[in-house]
Image: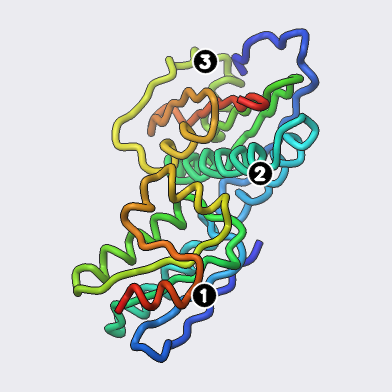
Amino acid sequence: MNAPEPSSDHLGTVELRIPSKPEWVAVARLAVAAIANRLPFSVEEIEDLKLAIAEACTMCIQQGPGSQTIDITCEAATAQLRVYVRDGRYRQRDDAGAKRPAVVAVDGEGLGIFLIQALMDDLTYSLDPQLGTELVMTKRVGA
Amino acid sequence: MDIKVHVRESDDDAYVVELGGEIDVYTSPKVKDAITELIDQGHYNLVINLEKVRYIDSTGLGVLIGGLKRVREHGGSVNLVCTNPQIKKIFDITGLVKIFGIYDDEAGAKKALA
């Protein structure tokens, strides 16, 4: 993982790996909601997070049918939650020490990306059929 | 995770699809099947009641949009019943409030179909 160094207000990191199948998306959604509940997010902000994470997992399933797993990493800080959602191919590249591609945006994305952009405060993503899918999104408390 | 789909004929020639639970990438095919079956049977005026829906994502929205496109080809319409603020917010930020008729109760949604 090429995540930035945790800042001093870093509270903890939680990693979750789910099968890349539709029936497991709800598990990711509920797990991230439970993590967000540890921070002073409002109920509405947690609902936003749940939807954004589910959209990201759905994108991994739809964009990367060859992947067996989805990795979700949550970095909790005092006033924000950053979530990395990657399909299994991305993880394999990182494990092998391969150079990661630059984060690129693609045209033609659907409602999923639009919703994540609207609900989260920051989003970068790469939806590459060859290199795998990665979305990095941040929700700030009270933003 | 669960989704409940209940289809019933209304007394004014419309069909009501009552949904309950969570509509996501796993459950949306079941919703799509119910709507597709109605349209295939020639029912083009639909009320989709989302009052008991706790959660909907883009795949659920996609199913509703697909249904609306199909009924419009036959001069029909789809009206929604939705009172959940979080779900209303999703329709709002996606601009779908301009495409669907969204009502607070079933009577209003059915009346607007007429």
Q: Amino acid at mark 2?
A: Ala
| SS class, disc 1 | strand
Q: Chain of mark 1?
A: B
- x and y, in percent, of residue A36 in the image: 73, 34
| SS class, disc 3 | loop
Q: Is residue B44 left or right of residue A128?
A: left
Q: Residues within 10 Å of mark 3 (few under 14, many from 20)?
A: few
Q: How is the image coloured?
A: rainbow
What is the quadrant of the N terminus of chain B in the image? bottom right
The residue mark sitting in front, 1 or 2, is 1
Q: Which residue corresponds to the image point at 62% horizontal and 18% vertical from the top-left?
A: A1
Foreground residue among B72 and A85: B72
* Marking on residue A28: 2
Foreground residue among A85 and B21: B21
Q: CA distance from mark 1 to mark 2?
A: 27 Å
Quarter location, residue A10: top right
Give yes or no for contact between labels 2 and 3 (Cβ–Cβ under 8 Å): no
Q: Is residue B108 above or below residue A121?
A: below
* Residue matched to label 3: A98
Foreground residue among B103 and A58: B103
Q: Amino acid at mark 1?
A: Glu
* Residue matched to label 1: B18
What is the quadrant of the C terminus of chain B in the image? bottom left
